[in-house]
Image (cartoon, helix red, strand yellow):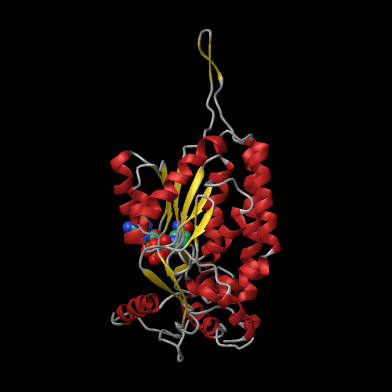
Amino acid sequence: MKGREAEMAASLPTQLLIGGAFEAGAGAPVPVVNPRTGAVIAEIAEADAGQVARAVEAAGRAFPAYAALPPAERAALLLRLADAIEAEAEDFAALEALNCGKPRPAVLRDEMPAIVDCFRFFAGAARCLSGSAAGEYLAGHTSMIRRDPVGPVAQIAPWNYPLMMAAWKIAPALAAGNTVVLKPSELTPLTALKLARIAAGILPEGVLNVISGRGPSTGQALIDAPGIAMISLTGSIGTGERVIQAASASIKRTHLELGGKAPVIVFDDADIDAAVAAVRDFGYYNSGQDCTAACRVYAGAKVYDRFVADLASAVTQLRYDRADDSENDIGPVISARQRERVGGFVARAAALPHVEVVAGGRDAAGSGFYYEP
Ligand code: NAD
């Protein structure tokens, strides 16, 4: 391990935040892996059923007082969170790069400012929650729509943008006066657990709880918890089905961001260089692990051959194996399992009579979970 990585490994955040206190998970240990090397960087015990229940109770206890805070006070808390994250942006970026295999300069440049801004944006939004259609719809009575917080929200995040997804979930929920139990992906819990350390010094006890663990155990216990008023998931369609089932038992609200496949159409009169550059960037950024990844292209007959040849050449030039991380365009995919899935898609496509693999399409050499673009 290099000096900086060894230092980070010694101070990795592994504890859960439940009701303002830090504690180790009481469930099974879950290995956290560096996708660049395949090495285990930490074992984090997951939250067991009792800890999930206590986290939900803590969020429930904190809710009435937090919901009653005036918008200005909620906004001030979110602004302090933003400042604190910004002050540690370098460390957050290093941790995210370690846990996801992303190039660290890309996290620092592309993700950290957006994460900080998300908290600042929702600090502003806390002050201007809109209600519409106010008026005297019944003589002598004024009717209006106002937006109130719903209560403790279970938030479940994926591994492709761990801290950004946590920010997208936490900031709006807290801005509106809800309390939160966040479960990051068991593959990438480190930045959310680091955020918990910061939040514990800023937010009132129990307003944000962070528990780590796998989906079928910790996640399922969380979405089934009776004290949860709403479930927010970013993840796969299968997990979305489970959330809807869990929500139906007690009519919880749901917010689901599930899988996507973004198509691109290249017309015969398109600027081919621009189209190639766009698909190279938006199809392969983050190693293609984006719900908005441009991963299906329909090209007009007149430009088809040139487009295919130029795109093949462009993606072959994507850099992922440089020792200097600032020279890398992409990293590995997140896990051995995910690389097998990607390889499976390519193998099934290649077995079709009309499909030809024109670039990459196999595991890269070495121990990390790299796949040739
Ligand atoms: P996943 O559904 O397996 O996991 C996502 C989260 O759900 C993880 O935290 C996981 O532990 C949890 N989970 C799994 N089973 C659960 C259960 N039974 N109860 C509660 N929680 C459970 O998805 P993944 O493979 O880790 O993530 C990739 C998926 O996320 C892809 O389908 C991708 O398209 C999608 N995604 C969508 C968006 C979007 O904005 N639409 C953004 C990022 C990722």
Please identify the quarter of the rendering in which residue 359 is found. bottom left
Above or below, 234 relative to 152: below
| Quarter of the displayed picture in which ligand 1 can be seen | bottom left
- Report whether 68 appears left or right of 360: right
Residue at left 46%, top 41%? 60
Between 189 and 293, the one lying in front of the other is: 189
Residue 51: % across, % down: 40, 54
Between 173 and 32, the one lying in front of the other is: 32
Residue 13: % across, % down: 54, 67
Residue at left 54%, top 69%? 282
Above or below, 273 relative to 193: below
Q: Residue furthest top?
A: 140
Q: Is residue 260 visible?
A: no
- Report whether 57 appears left or right of 202: left
Residue at left 52%, top 77%? 101
Quadrant showing the N terminus: bottom right
Q: Residue furthest bottom?
A: 365
Please identify the quarter of the rendering in which residue 249 is found. top left
Residue at left 55%, top 87%? 321
Between 344 and 159, the one lying in front of the other is: 159
Residue 113: % across, % down: 67, 61
How many labels were placed on the picture? 0
Between 331 and 80, the one lying in front of the other is: 80
Q: Is residue 163 visible?
A: yes
Residue 269: % across, % down: 55, 68
Above or below, 197 relative to 206: below
